[in-house]
Amino acid sequence: MSELDIIFTPLVAFDDLGHRLGMGGGYYDRTLAPFQTNHKPLAVGIAFDQQKVDRVPIESWDMPLQKIVTPSKIWQW
């Protein structure tokens, strides 16, 4: 995984801070956790505009995404 430049992640919902709501297994969070300090690979969520919500419930292990791409906008943090 250290050779990857980008990881596209699915999501159920996302908020203004880059938090994603997945399917509840924590698989993406555990995969991305070792790379949090150097931001590589880039974690990009793919979503529809309608999946944006005011607030996603987060836990201590949840990893925010660096970008989320929707049909109308690219969100970046």
Image (spheres, helix red, strand yellow):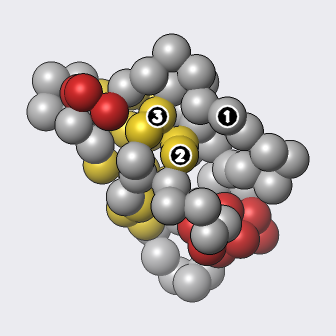
Residue type, numbered disc 2: Leu
* Residue 57 image label: 1
Q: Mark 1 to mark 2: distance in Å?
A: 8 Å
Where is residue 67 drawn, in percent x and y? Answer: 44, 39
* Residue 21 image label: 2
Q: Secondary structure at mark 1?
A: loop
> Would residue 61 be visible to someone looking at this image?
yes
Label 3, on which residue? 14
For residue 4, above or below residue 11? below
For residue 1, above or below residue 24? below
Q: At 51% across and 15% down in the image, what residue appears? A: 54
* Residue 36 lies in quadrant: bottom right
Q: Mark 3 to mark 1: distance in Å?
A: 10 Å
User: Which part of the image, by quadrant, shows the C terminus?
Assistant: top right
Residue type, numbered disc 1: Pro
C-beta proximity under 8 Å, tags 1 and 2: yes
For residue 65, above or below residue 31? above
Where is residue 55 drawn, in percent x and y? Answer: 58, 21
User: Which part of the image, by quadrant, shows the N terminus?
Assistant: bottom right
